[in-house]
Each structure stands twice: as structure tokens, then as C-alpha cells.
Image (tube, helix red, strand yellow):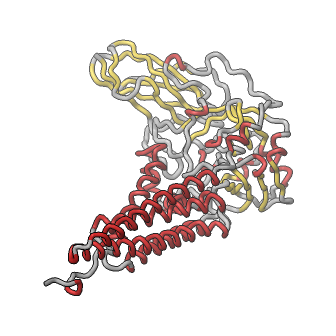
Amino acid sequence: MTTLQDAPPRRLSLPVAALVGVLALAAALGVGHLVAGFVGYTASPFIAVANYVVDHSPTAVVKWAERTLGTWDKPVLKVGLAVVLVLFALLAGQLSRRTPRAGQILVVLLGAAGVAAVYARSDLGQVSLLAPIAALVAGLAAFTSLHRLALSRESADQGAALSRESAASGASRRKFLRAGVGVVAGSGVAAVVGQVAGTSSNAEDSRATVGPLVPARTAPPLPADADFAKLGSPPFITPNGDFYRIDTALVVPQIRTEDWSLKIHGLVDREVTFSYADIRNRPLVERRVTLTCVSNEVGGPLISNASWIGVDLVDLLDEAGVQAGAEQMFATSVDGWTCGTPANVALDPQRGAMLAIGMNGEPLPVEHGFPARIVIPGLYGYVSATKWVQSLEFTKWSDRQAYWLSRGWGEQAPIKTESRIDTPSGFARVPAGKVRLAGTAWAQHTGIAKVEVRLDQGPWQLATLSAEVSKDTWRMWWAELDVPKGTHQAFVRATDQDGYTQTENRADPVPDGATGWHSVSLDAS
């Protein structure tokens, strides 16, 4: 006769063990998100670890993600991190089918990773460590208690099988299920409360109170032929919703105007700090500037143009009195991202550098830097376009290394003369005969002098240029080519007002911008 003493050691089934690990993960993330809502939204362990991955990924991986995934890189990262965490949770459960020790160790290690990720953030204070610590404690407690209940359930099932007493088995099963449902519900409520608390300081509400931004110095009226949108070029002004966005922020910073300030310090005669009201009440200037991302491949979409409203940056810098030894303006964003701009460019009154608070006639959109951002014409965005800016420190290059400079990108980063065919698209089918091409060319702060197109290896033909609005903005063009039947390649190149014609030699964006002629394949019939 079989007795309880003869029974095999208690052991969780695979599904139950997996469930214990996943429920513990849910408890940890929910509690961590709850506490982060009160001590710093980005201190949520999930967000902090994701930010750490972004900040410490090899440059090649980051560039691959931007090139392959575009603006989907951040959602894909979040999904990927969630999958990895679930796999670890499953592993913790599977390693703990008899005893919880191995799973508890894994939970502690994962919790410690969250603590380290928050500790490494320069934009978070020490109190923010409460979020990952709370997550660690909650995850460990949930794992331990659920494992004990689950093991009791398995023991009761075994006892019922041997003694025919099913009451104990049913009670244990119900207790485990109630605990599991409680963890799920509690985690969900905690996450929601944390989300609401963390985003209660809603920047959109603050943005809505800014009111109309009326520049004292307006940009000249746009000429009728500023673009050839009817012929296939982009519109001269990019709508805010279509303006490209490249940054490292997994969570868009939510800063209210009353909480924002800009400090100018370092190698200056006097440290100065400006509030939003200080900037808002100054005479504002409107300036049209095209921004370009250094990650833009030849023919790529990471370029947009807007009408910016703000103040001349050089006026603010003059109040601080930047010293002669300063080599870079080291800008820091609210989310901790850093940017190094050549000091001589920022201080050049002819450059037109701005602290912008408006974009296309309205306050800056939150995702584009509200309350304020830097806009400096002629330099790639990673050295000239800090969003959510809060600090400008003047230093020597050897003293501080900005985010992308430390990853192998160039120091000066002037935008290269480039052009693009927007219409027709690549591999388009077109009727043989006259085919109209339209596109964009740019050489910010130098200006475009001419654009040429050609078919296959034929002669270059001049394109018709749109009116020049500013040397700091892109310029549209169109041309017609005689395209015989068959498959052909159309090319474009631009020449800037310094006489430089863009090279056909292809270069990757790293370290200081891509080069090469853009081309499209045409199938004429």
C-alpha cells in the first residue's frame, strides 16, 4: 500500500512554475511603476532599463535600428525588453519547481539591474531609487509567497490522490488562484495609478496656456514658388505632425513652463538662469530653419523645415559673458541627453542660433522640445538641436564629451550639400517620353546655387529651382527628362553657393554625415 511517506518529493508542474514567475514579474513592474509615479516617472524599472539599453548600445546597433526601424525603434525596443523579462520570469519559475531559492536569486539579480539602471541616470535623484527597490521587494515577496501557495497546492493534489480526500486539494487550488488574481489586479491598479501620477504634470495643459506667440521680428512672406508641391516636391513648411523626430527619449519629457528654467554656466563671467516667463516676455524673432539628422542616408527622409519662434541665443549668452577659452557649448536636456556645439558657432551673431519656444505658429509640440529647445542653422541636429534643454555649460572639448561624440561621431558636424529625388519614387513605372522629376536640395547656411539631373550616363541637365527663402532652408527643384522605353536610372546632384558640387562617392552617415548622389530606377513602357 502506498503511503504519503512513499510519495515523490513535492514539485511544481511546468505551467504552474511558469505562472509563478510571470505573476512575480507583474507585481514587480506594477509596484515599481506606482512608486515611480511619485519619485520620478523615468525611475520606473522597465523604463530605466530600456533607457540604459539605449544609452549603452554600440553605435552600430543604434544606427542599424534607426536605419531599419525608423521611428519604430523605441516601440520595438520596449516590446523586445518585455519579451526578455518574460523569458527571465519563466526561467525563474522553471528553476524553482522544488525550492524557490534559484528563482529568488534571479529575481534579486533582475531587481538589482533595475536599481543600477536608475542609479546611472544623471537626470534622477537618489530618492528615485525607491522605485526599483520597491519593485525588487514586491517581486521577491510575490515570488516567495506564490511559490509557497503553489507548492501547497501540489502537495494537496498529491495528498488527495493518495487519500481520496479532495477537499484539501480544492481549498489549496482556490487559495492559489485567489492569490494569483489578486497579484494581477493589484499590479494593474498600481501601474495605472503610477501612470496617472507620473503624467499628472501634463505638459499639454501647460502648453495650452502659453497663448499666441507674436514675433517682434517676423520672417519675410513666403514667395508663391517656395516649393513645387503640386509637381511632387514636399511642401516648403513641414507640418508639425510630419516633422521628423529622432531622439533617445523613450518617454517624452513632460515639463510645465512654471517648472522649466535654463541655466548658462561654466566658462562664463557670471552664471545666469532664465525662467520661461523671462524668455516669453522678450521680443521674439521668427526664423525659418531646416533641420537635418546626421543619420540621414542618401535620399533619406530625416530632414524637415519649420518656422521657429524664439529669441536670439547670442543675446542670452552675452548676458552670461562667455569667456575666450570656451570651446564648446555643452547642452543638457531634461532627460539627461547631452549635446556639444562649437562655441564659436553658437556665439556668431550672423549664424542665427535660437532658443526656440514656438514652431509653425504655435508653442513647441511636446515631442519637439516644449517648453524650449535649441535651433542652430547649418549643423546636424546632434550638435545643434537639443530638445527640452535646461542647461548650457561652456567648457573645453577635453572637459566634457557629449552623448554622440563619445560614440565616435564628429565634433564640428557641418551639414553637407545634398539633394534628393522625391518624385517619381524608386522602381516607378512611367510612360516613355517626357518624365517630370521633382525633389529637394539643401546646403544649410551656405545655400543652393543649382541642381542638375541626368539619365543613366547621359549629360547633366539644369533643373528649375524654387525661390530661395533663406540660405538656412532647403530648396525645391523640378526637371524633365526624355526617358526611352526600358529600365533606367535617374540621378541628381546639387552645387552650393560656395561652388562645391556634391560628390558621387558614397559614405555612410558615421561619423559626420552621408554623401553620394541619390538615384531612382525608372521602368518606362
Q: Name above or below for residue 10 compared with residue 434.
A: below
Front position in the image: 320 or 500: 320
Quadrant containing the N terminus in the rendered view: bottom left
Q: Is residue 376 left or right of residue 16?
A: right
Residue 481 horizontal side relative to residue 37, left or right: left
Across and down, in percent, residue 271 comes to 83, 59
Q: What residue do we see at 39% from left, 61% from top? A: 86
Tell me which residue sits at (48%, 57%) in the image: 185
Q: Is residue 161 left or right of residue 519?
A: left
**Horizontal side of residue 39 vs 60, given as left or right:** right
Instruction: Spot the residue most to the bottom.
Output: 5
Quick check: can you spot residue 166? yes
Does any portion of residue 462 appear in the rendered image?
no
Give the vertical position of 196 relative to 212 (above or below).
below
Residue pictured at 74% horizontal, 43% vertical: 355
Quadrant where the C terminus lies?
top left
